[in-house]
Image: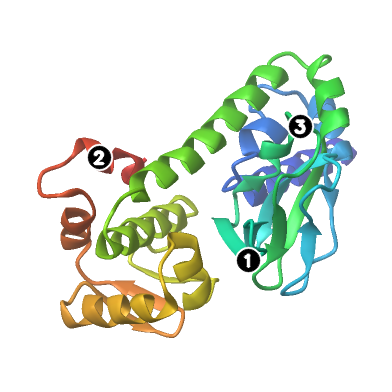
């Protein structure tokens, strides 16, 4: 009876974590029950963060990587003149904290955009387990590489683009990220404000307002507050990457 209950528990855990970027790390399919148990032992479920609460601040010592379970987090740095610059948005199933591995300190701050739950994976414990569990180190490196590549790819995509192109690119990115979680690619709620989105894209808030208005007038989207519906994904792709530019769209469909 105990063995049967154990199987049910593991199945439930796998199902709950199946949308997370850390799934292949925390619960690789080749692990036996004992290895899964060791991994579960080091994963810590933190209390939910309230809106505006920090997960960590810039220059805090690096101790763990984090996986967003629910809610959303923004990462920020301070410019030379002390202004906040948003460097990323992290949705459920995505990880953060990887950029602190090299220096041992977080180069940015991570702040909850809304009530947010995260999993904390102490890095020292994870490294130690990687020496004991075959394949775990490779899984760790693969996931880290994938996440860093995705961040750099999006930054490259919006660099030196027009305001219209930047907004189209980021909306398509969110569409794809929600889609990977099994949610609608055409209807979703953005967790950030328009001002935060404009900060991230390097645009003035009034420019962002005009862009949303223009996109709605052109029939590309409908928007009500943070609720977004993409009405013409094909036209958005053409705007973002040019007609027939299939190669430059690949990261939005992966």
Give the residue at mark 2.
248
Disc 2 from disc 1: Cα separation:
32 Å
Residue visible at 78% across and 58% down?
Answer: 55
Quarter of the figure with the N terminus: top right
Mark 2: give few (<14), some (14-19) or many (20+) Cα within 10 Å: few
Q: Dot 1 lies on which element?
A: loop
Residue found at the far front of this picture: 81
Give the residue at mark 3.
103
Q: Nearer the viewer, mark 3 or mark 2?
A: 3
Residue 146 visible in this rendered orientation of the protein: yes
Disc 3 from disc 2: Cα separation:
32 Å
Residue found at the far bottom of this picture: 224
Q: Is residue 144 left or right of residue 65?
A: left
Find residue 174 and report its horizontal and vertical position in percent: 42, 59
> Residue 86 occupies which quadrant of the picture?
bottom right
Residue 27 visible in this rendered orientation of the protein: no
Quarter of the figure with the C terminus: top left
Q: Dot 3 lies on which element?
A: loop
Q: Is residue 191 left or right of residue 164?
A: right
Q: Is residue 121 left or right of residue 141?
A: right
Disc 3 from disc 1: Cα separation:
23 Å
**Whether label 2 touches label 1, CB < 8 Å:** no
Find residue 250 and report its horizontal and vertical position in percent: 29, 39
**Mark 2 or mark 1, earlier in chain:** 1
Any mark on residue 252, and which? none
Determine whether 241 is above or below 34 in the image: below
**Whether label 3 touches label 1, CB < 8 Å:** no
Residue visible at 38% across and 58% down?
Answer: 170
Give the residue at mark 1.
83
| Residue situated in front as seen by the camera: 157 or 7 | 157
Q: Dot 2 lies on which element?
A: helix
């Amino acid at each position: 009876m105990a063995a049967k209950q154990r199987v049910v528990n593991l199945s439930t855990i796998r199902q709950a974590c199946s949308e997370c970027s850390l799934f292949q790390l925390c619960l690789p399919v080749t692990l036996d029950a004992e290895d899964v148990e060791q991994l579960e032992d080091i994963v810590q479920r933190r209390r939910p963060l309230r809106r505006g609460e920090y997960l960590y601040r810039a220059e805090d010592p690096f101790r763990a990587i984090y996986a967003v379970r629910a809610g959303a987090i923004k990462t920020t740095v301070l410019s030379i003149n002390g202004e906040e610059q948003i460097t990323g948005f992290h949705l459920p199933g995505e990880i953060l904290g990887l950029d602190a591995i090299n220096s041992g300190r977080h180069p940015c701050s991570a702040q909850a955009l809304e009530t947010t739950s995260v999993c904390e994976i102490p890095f020292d414990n994870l490294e130690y387990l990687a020496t004991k569990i075959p394949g775990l180190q490779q899984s760790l490196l693969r996931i880290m590489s994938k996440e860093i590549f995705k961040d750099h790819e999006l930054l490259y995509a919006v660099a030196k683009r027009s305001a219209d192109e930047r907004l189209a690119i980021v909306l398509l990115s969110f569409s794809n990220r929600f889609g990977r979680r099994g949610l609608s690619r055409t209807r979703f709620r953005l967790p950030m404000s328009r001002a935060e989105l404009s900060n991230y894209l390097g645009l003035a808030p009034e420019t962002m307002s005009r862009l949303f208005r223009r996109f709605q007038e052109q029939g590309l989207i409908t928007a009500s507050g943070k609720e977004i519906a993409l009405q013409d994904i094909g036209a958005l792709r053409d705007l973002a990457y040019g007609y027939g530019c299939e190669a430059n769209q690949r990261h939005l469909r992966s």
